[in-house]
Amino acid sequence: MKKIFVSLTAILATCTVSANPMFGNGHENSIAIFAGPGTGAGSLLKLVDPIEWEFSPMTTIGVTYSQPMSIFKIPARMNATVIQNIAYHSAKGLSFFGVGLSWDIAFLDWNGWYVGAGLGPYYRDNHDRWVSSRLVFGEKFFIGKNITDDLRVEFFTLHFSNGDLTETNRGFNFTGLAVGYSF
């Protein structure tokens, strides 16, 4: 048990909050492209419980522009995102185009790996049977790896819902990969 505690202490001692792991050294901008399948309608719990995922016949693709910042001295980024979701069968999926603003924080940074979460509002071009409003909120968890000073890869899960602003609010979920370039 003492060995495990010493190992965890060593890992936490090497974690840093002074640099922003989602950007390379001195970079002030980042562009990322992302894509992934739908993991079904449902609650926010699907972000962190892959057993609950039920892959849906839909794909989300998008582009995100980001700038570094900090929130309470925690490395963060602010994002502007354009997203297109494409459903293959309208009975099981949904199609929409949307734009959004979001803020992500990286609460763990270790040896080029980072873990974080994000939140922000999005506006869609339509409403559907899962969420009966065009305004939705996106919640995200991600694990990233810096490949080089300029290039990173992230695995993410993303949940959209409207916070029960309307009667119909089942939410919908995605998982996928993002590739980002900082400059």
Image: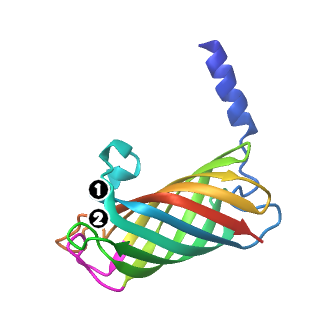
Point out residue 136 in the picture as x, y percentages from the top left corner: 35, 74
Please identify the quarter of the rendering in which residue 165 is found: bottom left
- Residue named by callout 2: 171
Residue 162 in the image: above or below residue 124: above
Is any atom of residue 158 visible in this view? no
Q: Which mark is residue 43?
A: 1
- Check if mark 2's residue and mark 1's residue have beta carbons within 8 Å: yes
Q: Quadrant of residue 40?
A: bottom left
Q: Which numbered disc flags the more N-terminal residue, 2 or 1?
A: 1
Q: What is the image's colouring?
A: rainbow
Instruction: Report the side of 58 relative to 5 (left or right).
Output: left
Residues in magenta, as a range: 125-136
Residue 82 pos. (x, y %): 51, 79
| Residue at the image position 68 percent from the left and 24 percent from the top | 7
Q: CA distance from mark 2 to mark 1?
A: 6 Å
- Residue drawn at 36 percent across, 79 percent down: 96
Relative to 172, 149 lies left or right: right
